[in-house]
Amino acid sequence: MQEPRTRRTGDRKNQLATIAAELFRARGYHGVGINDIAAAAGITGPALYRHFADKQAVLAYVLLSGVRDMETETTAALSTMGRPSGEQVDQLLAAIASASVERREVAALWRWEGKHLSPADQREIGRRSSAILTAWAKVLLEVRPELAAADAELLCWAALSVFGSVSVHHTTVAKRRFVQLLSALAKRVLSTDLPPAAAAPVPAPAAGIGTPSRREQLLSAATELFRQRGFHDVSMEDIGAAAGIAGPSVYRHFPSKTSLIHAIARRTADRLALAVEEVLRNSADELEALRCLVSSYVQVLTGSAELAVTFTIDGVNLAERDRAELLRIQRDYVAQWVSLLCTVHPGLNAREAKITVHAALTIANDLARTRRINARPNLPGELETLLQAVLDLR
C-alpha cells in the first residue's frame, strides 16, 4: 500500500517541478513566487509546501534532476564501451542531445538561475557536473590520444555548451533533425584541432591620457561589480564607492541600478551592431564576413566584462520598452549571422542555421565565463577556432 502512494507523491513533485521550471524560465527566479507556482498547478500555497520547503528547494530539485538525467545517459553509454570508438561517442552525443531537446528549460535555469541555489546545492551540482565532464574527457582522450588533458577538457566543455545552447532561443525543428544537428555540431567541436599557443604575449594597450568622465567611471565600476557579484547583490552605494564617488552623487548620472545595466547593455549591443556594419562593408564575400564576425565577437567578449554582464539582464526588471529594444538589436545581430551562414551553407534552412549560430555563440559565452577555462593564455584564438568549427568555416 505504501509504494503506490510514494510513487504518486514522487509524480506530483515532478509535476510541480516541471511547472515551476517553465515559470522560472519565463519570468526569472525573482519574478516567481510560491503562490504563482501553486496557482499554475491548481493547488494552494500550503499544499505546495508539503512537497518543497521553499522556492529555492524547487529550483534545486529541478536542476539536480537535470544533472541526474545527464549522469544516467553518460553512465548508460559508457557502460557499453570497452575501448571507446567513434561510433560509441556518436551514440553518447545523440543521447545527450535528445535529453537536451526534451528538457530545454533545465539548461536555461542552470545557466541563468543557478546562482540562486544554496552554496551546498551549488557545490553538489558543480561536483556532479565536473564528474560528468571528467568522464567525457577520459573517453575523448581514448579516441584522440594526441590531446593534452586540459585541451580534452576544453573541448568537452565546448560540446556541453552546444547542448546547452538550446536554452538561449526558442527555435525548433523536428526532434529527430534537432538531435542530429546538435550531435553533428558537438562532434565538430570534439574533432577540432586547437591552435598552438601564441609565441609571445600580446602587449597591453597604452594607458592613455586624461581622466575618464564620472559617467564612464561609474559604468566601469558597475560593470566589474556586476560581473563579480551579480546585479542583485550590488548596491548603488557599492558602485559609488568603487568609483570613488559619494553615494548621492551617483544619482546625478544614473537614477537607478537598472538604468546603469541598461546603459551597459545598450553600449555593448551598439558596439556589436557597428562591428557587423564594418564587416559587411569590408568583406569580399559571405565566408570572409562570417570569419570576421567571429573575430570581432571574440574580441568584444574577451576584451571587457560588458558583454558578460549583459548576459545577466534577463533577471533585471527593465522597462518593457528598454527590454524590447535590446531584444530587437540582439535578434538583428543574430539574423545577420544566420543570413550569412545560409549563403555559405545553402543546405541549411533558416531554422537550422539559427540553431547552429546560437550553438557557436553559446560556446564563446560559456567558456569566457567558466573559471576553469577563461584563464587559458590562448583563449581568444581557441574560441575563434571553435566557433569556426561549429559554423564549418574551415
Image (cartoon, grey):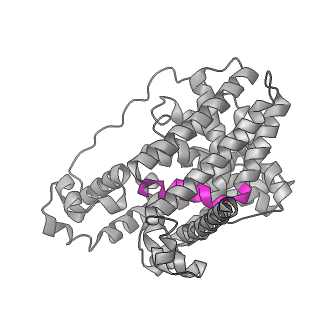
Quadrant (top left/top right/bottom left/bottom right) for the N terminus: bottom right
Span highlighted in magenta in the image: 101-116
What residue occupies the far top of the structure in this picture?
146
- Image side of residue 259 versus residue 6, left or right: left
- Name the image quarter holding the C terminus: top right
Does 104 lie within the magenta span? Answer: yes
Residue 124 percent coordinates (x, y): 48, 43
> On the picture, is 79 further left or further right than 364?
right
Using the image, determine if residue 275 lies above or below residue 134. below
Rendered location of residue 203, percent (x, y): 39, 29
Quarter assignment of residue 386: top right
For residue 27, side relative to residue 19 (left or right)? left
Q: Residue at horizontal 77%, vertical 62%? A: 351
Locate residue 381 relative to residue 104 in the image: left or right.
Answer: left
Q: Residue at x 84, y 55 (%)?
A: 177
Measured as percent of width and height from the top left, residue 265 is found at: 43, 63
